[in-house]
Image (cartoon, grey):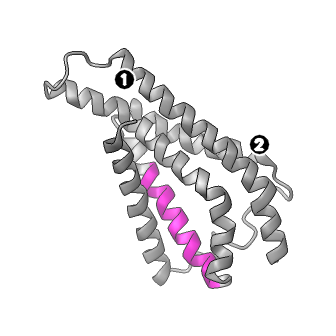
């Protein structure tokens, strides 16, 4: 996998995370991030999987938007997470807040970063072609890497959805 694209994705996500956390220091987002943010009283893994696949899809569409949707969505998802962590940490202890994020977040956050790398893959290769650093616009190897990134992100999103439904929700109930 291309470490440059993963690094760019990670940087944008962390920039959004820090910005969201900092923003929540001076803005009250509690109307947006309550203790029970789910409309569905008993969401299952499919609920979380569908939601996160939609997010990943927006990240992947950077392949056709020259990375624009990927950039915006990596930053905004980081911002949302950062502001949510700070807001919920004001309602709960920080350790409780992290225990509601980390079990599934260990898989979900890398999935989003990898999906972001996929979204940047095609524009990156187009740029390399335009700059004369490669002879073909998109090679078979480029396409394989794009789909490998997409596949890995889907697998991680699935694992995260199962953990969120089966572990995170049970933790949340015990903390209520």
Residue situated in front as seen by the camera: 127 or 7: 7
The residue tagged with tag 2: helix, strand or loop?
helix
> Is residue 106 toward the left or the right of residue 1 in the image?
right
Q: Which residues are magenta?
A: 73-90
Mark 2 or 1: the one toward you: 1
Coordinates of residue 157 in the picture (x, y in percent): 63, 44
Q: CA distance from mark 2 to mark 1?
A: 31 Å
What residue is rendered at 86% in x and 56% in y?
A: 42
Circle 1: is it few (<14), some (14-19), or many (20+) Cα within 10 Å? some
Left/right placement of residue 121 relative to residue 126 reads: right
The circle drawn on residue 142 is 1
Classify the position of the C terminus by image quarter: bottom right
Instruction: Determine which residue is flagged by label 2.
Output: 46
Q: Could you tell me residue 72's position as x and y percent?
A: 41, 50
Q: Is residue 156 above or below residue 168?
A: above
Q: Where residue 162 is drawn, which disc sits there?
A: none
Whether tag 2 and tag 1 are in contact, CB under 8 A, the answer is no
The N terminus sits in image quarter = top left
């Amino acid at each position: 996998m291309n470490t440059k694209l993963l690094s760019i994705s990670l940087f944008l996500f962390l920039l959004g995370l820090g910005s969201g956390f900092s923003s929540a220091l001076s803005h009250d987002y509690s109307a947006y991030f309550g203790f029970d943010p789910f409309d569905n009283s008993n969401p299952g893994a499919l609920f979380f999987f569908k939601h996160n696949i939609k997010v990943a899809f927006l990240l992947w569409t950077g392949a056709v938007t020259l990375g624009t949707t990927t950039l915006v969505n990596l930053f905004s998802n980081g911002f949302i997470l950062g502001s949510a962590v700070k807001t919920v940490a004001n309602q709960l202890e920080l350790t409780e807040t992290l225990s509601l994020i980390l079990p599934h977040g260990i898989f979900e956050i890398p999935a989003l970063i990898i999906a972001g790398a996929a979204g940047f893959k095609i524009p990156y290769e187009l740029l390399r072609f335009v700059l004369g650093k490669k002879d073909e616009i998109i090679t078979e190897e480029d396409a394989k890497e794009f789909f490998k990134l997409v596949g890995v992100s889907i697998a991680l999103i699935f694992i995260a959805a199962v953990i969120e439904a089966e572990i995170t929700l049970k933790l949340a109930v015990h903390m209520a």
